[in-house]
Image (cartoon, grey):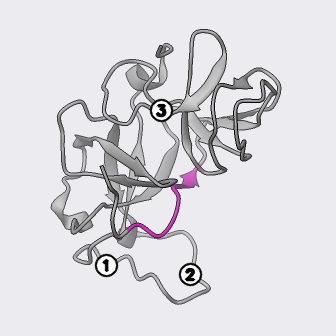
Amino acid sequence: MAVTGITGKPEVVRYGSAREERYAYVDGGAFEIGDLIRLTSGGEIKIADVDSSAAGAVHGIALASVPSEVNETVPILLFAEDTVIGIQTVDSLSPDGLAKGQTYTLETSGGLWGITSTTTNGVGTVEDFAATGIPWSDPTGTYDNDITVDNNKVLVSFAQAILDGHSA
């Protein structure tokens, strides 16, 4: 699927109990810094499984870019249940089209990530709207995060059941 209207990657808004890992995992494919990733049972880092509620669909975010599988260790941030990311809504969806506390699927295309309004096999739970209380200011003056504007951000977490386990 094409992801339209997205201008940036997910951002970590609250680290919570997330931890950085630099030596434990090797890349299992190409990805860019800021891509959501998952870990396989073999210890490889791969792009997140965006439309599955299975354990291991998402584990964290890439802290470095890897142009292809080169079998080297890659720094990643492993999410915890209390980690929150900011992610844009896709296509013509505005944040107020999503419900707080509901779990939705993610989409990725061309290195960009967004959250959809589809709840079937969702992985990201909407905690809040970015407009509610952004803990930073936008130095570009470009983003207002109005909840009625398409492609603005929502704040998302991942349940422990998603973070546990490994996907194939």
Identity, as a three-letter code, of the amino acid under mark 2: Asp
User: To which residue does mark 1 refer?
Assistant: 146
Provide the secondary structure element on which disc 3 rests. Answer: loop
- Look at mark 2 in the image and give the residue it sits on: 138
**Which is nearer the eye, 104 or 135?**
104
Circle 2 packing at 10 Å, graded few (<14), some (14-19), many (20+), is few
Who comes first in sequence, dot 1 or dot 2?
Answer: 2
Bounds of the magenta span? 6-14
Give the foreground label among 3 and 1. Answer: 1
Left or right of 147? Residue 156 is right
Above or below, comparing residue 90 to residue 1 in the picture? below
First in residue order: circle 3 vs circle 2: 3
Percent position (x, y) of residue 43? 66, 15
Amino acid at dot 1: Asp
Q: Indicate the position of residue 26 as horizontal and vertical percent values.
A: 74, 24
Of badges 3 and 2, the one in the foreground is 2
